[in-house]
Image: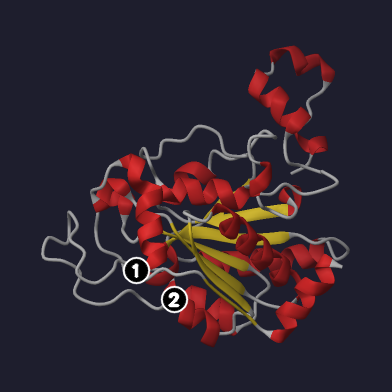
Amino acid sequence: MSKKIITPVKEFEEFLTPEYKELIANGPYNRDKPTTVDDLGTFYEMTGPHPHCAGCGVSLAIRLGLASLPAPEDTIVIGTPGCSYFALTQSTLNYSCTAFGNQNSVASGLKRMLKVRHPDKQKDVLVMVGDGGVADIGLDNTLHSWFRGENIATVMLDNEVYGNTGGQESGMTTEGTVLNMAPTGKKFPKIPMFELAKTSGCVYAAKVTVASPKKVGETIRKAILVAREIGPTYVQVYGPCPTNLKFPPSKTIEAAKDGEKSYYKYEEYMTDGAKEYLNRSKA
């Protein structure tokens, strides 16, 4: 993606919508300084209207993440069916939707291909999918991409439920939670994906909630940068689901804050190599 690609010939300018013209004139592509969460409201965002439920924590996490990409014009996002799909397919990004759960395998192949096709330019490959795709159906593909040391960043949009199919429990649902399709409550604890990331080869990992927007943006940005040279990275973002967790849509941030105070405290892990690389990047 670049302004060159999205800028039309002059003969078609009069037919463009105001939103498209604004995207070209004031979008996040090819800037001297990449946008961050702090810049939200000052540029035309890559996420437009989407059909997510009111108060959706996943859509908020996507918005914060996409606002923090180091190089959106050189980024491809790999997704999978689920709630995240609805916003990502309508974003102005290079996006590929895979079969359910094999997103890290597809991302691995694309990253290797891009290194061959563009040896002199960084092309970022970002996996951005829900908890079902990362921790349940795609767990084997996720872990093996980490074992192999693939240069991709994985972001789990953790709403703790299969939201778009009626409210089944997922491996990331907290123990005891009652859902539409788990009427007696979840019977086992939340899968420790953050701990698995640290022991399975990730050189950078973080656990955040949408109640801390800057941390969401900073951790995703770090994950993408480190994945370029050092190895696989992982960010776990809690964005609670009001529809299936049965709280008012206006209380999403409050619910995320409650998680942040208890079982979803902010954590960050990085190897010495990742830390050194980030320090060099700042310099």
Residue 131: x %, y % from top left: 40, 63
Q: Residue at x 28, y 50 (%)?
A: 165
Kind of residue at disc 2: Met
Mark on residue 172? Answer: 1
**Front residue of this view, candidates 73 and 223:** 223
Colour convention: secondary structure
User: Along the polypeptide, which appears first: circle 1 or circle 2?
Assistant: 1
- The quadrant of the picture occupied by the C terminus is bottom right
Taking 116 as reference, is 50 above or below it?
above
Q: What residue lies at 28% left-to-right and 45% top-to-bottom? A: 243
Rendered-image quadrant of the N terminus: top right
Q: Who is closer to the viewer here, 163 or 37?
A: 37
Looking at the rendered structure, which numbered label has been put on residue 224?
Answer: none
Query: In the rendered image, which residue does mark 2 sit on?
Result: 193
Q: Is residue 120 left or right of residue 162?
A: right
Q: Is 240 located above or below residue 195 in the figure?
A: above
